[in-house]
Amino acid sequence: MSKIMINQDKEMLDDDFIYNYLKDAYWAKGRTMEMVQTTIRNSICFGVYKDNRQIGFARVVSDKAVFAYIMDVFILPEQQGNGYGSELMSKILNDSELKNVQNWLLAISDAHGLYQKFGFKALPNPDKIMGKVSF
């Protein structure tokens, strides 16, 4: 397995790369480049790099104490299966600013096994969670 680098340096993020992946992702269809740039600007972002090329991304919205929501997590399909998603999740959950957050959420339709390794599980009372969403 090749070594990867994961950091929060927004200057290193490739907005075009992120937008081009997300515009085809089932959870982000319809997002414009402007929307993607706004989400990057207003989130804690994690870029994943291999051989000086971005291969993944995730972002977190959080108050850094009580609540954090993980979104837009991806590793390029050709790089999946190498443990990079696990490294990314570990980096997020152990980040110095986020490691003490009490409650984490994410919404997914796939990759449940990855998140279960980090203690995520289906919520016992989903009828207590409400949302106002556009998808």
Image (spheres, helix red, strand yellow):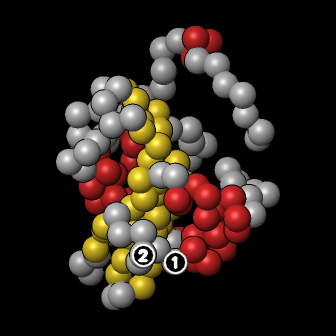
Query: In which quadrant of the rendered view does residue 119 lie?
Result: top left
User: Which amino acid, mark 1?
Assistant: Asp
Element marked by disc 1: loop
Which residue corresponds to mark 1?
Answer: 14
Badge 2 density bin: few <14, some 14–19, many ≥20, Cα 10 Å: few
109 is higher (above) or lower (below) than 73? above
User: Which amino acid, mark 2?
Assistant: Glu
Quadrant placement of the N terminus = bottom left
The residue at the far bottom in this view is: 51
92 is higher (above) or lower (below) than 102? below
Residue 87 drawn at (x, y percent): 29, 60
Quadrant placement of the C terminus = top right
Q: Nearer the viewer, residue 131 or 82?
A: 131
Query: In which quadrant of the rendered view does residue 28 lie?
Result: bottom right
Residue 81 drawn at (x, y percent): 40, 66
Which residue sits at x=42%, y=85%?
A: 53
Query: In which quadrant of the rendered view does residue 15 lie?
Result: bottom right
Which residue sits at x=70%, y=68%?
A: 33
Q: Which mark is residue 11?
A: 2
Instruction: For marks 2 and 1, give the one nearer the viewer.
Output: 2
74 is higher (above) or lower (below) than 65? below
Q: Nearer the viewer, residue 40 or 83?
A: 40
